Amino acid sequence: MDWGTLAGTALGALVGAGSTMAADRSRWKRDHFTREHTTRRELYSQYLAALSLTTHRLRDLRRLGPTAREERARQAGDVLSTSGAYQARYQMLITAPDALAEPTERAFRALRDLRDRFDQPDVRKDPEWDAAMNTVSETMGTLKQAMRDDLSTLV
């Protein structure tokens, strides 16, 4: 038997197997990044939607809600609890990169502070309401930009 033929066949098998493994690894990496990008994009959308929904409902509650302070405060708490913001916040803190932890928390704190405005005797006449709403808008804007920056690094 010719050793050259045997060595050539073995070398061909090694090159073929190595090429296949490299292609599989490349495909796996691409699929992993695609899944990660999709997962983050969906999570970011859910969190922003929950924050926006809560903000909208709190604004409506201020405008159209009951006049009794205790009932308004209870309803404001219910708005935040039922919006999904708490759940999405924890998912963000677990899933999103560390760079998003601070903007995630800041936006949530601003929303919680807005909810706490309903503890005032008359939230409809609260002179700090507009400032609290501006803080919510600014923190959400900062969070959106941080999310966009993160998603652009995955592409």
Image (cartoon, grey):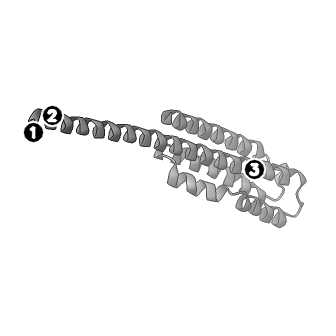
Q: Position of residue 27 (x, y in %)?
A: 43, 39
Q: Nearer the viewer, residue 44 or 86?
A: 44
Marked residue nearer the N-terminal end (1 or 3)? 1
At 51% from the left and 45% from the top, the residue drawn is 36
Vertical comparison of 83 with 70: above or below = above
Label 2, label 3: how far apart the Cα atoms are:
71 Å
Callout 1–callout 2 Cβ contact below 8 Å: yes
In the picture of the structure, the residue carrying the numbered disc 3 is 53
Q: Which mark is residue 1?
A: 1
Vertical comparison of 39 with 91: above or below = above
Residue type at tag 2: Thr
Vertical comparison of 73 with 5: above or below = below
Q: Nearer the viewer, residue 59 or 117?
A: 59
Please state the total of marks drawn on the protein image: 3
Vertical comparison of 34 with 71: above or below = above
Q: Nearer the viewer, residue 132 or 53?
A: 53
At 68% from the left and 44% from the top, the residue drawn is 136
Callout in the foreground (2, 3):
2
Q: Position of residue 119 (x, y in %)?
A: 76, 60
* Quadrant containing the N terminus in the rendered view: top left
Residue type at tag 3: Leu
- Which SS class for mark 2? helix
- Which SS class for mark 3? helix
In the picture of the structure, the residue carrying the numbered disc 2 is 5
- Which SS class for mark 1? loop
* Badge 3: residue crowd in 10 Å (few <14, some 14–19, many ≥20): some
Residue type at tag 1: Met
At 46% from the left and 38% from the top, the residue drawn is 30
Q: Position of residue 33 (x, y in %)?
A: 48, 41
Q: Position of residue 25 (x, y in %)?
A: 37, 41
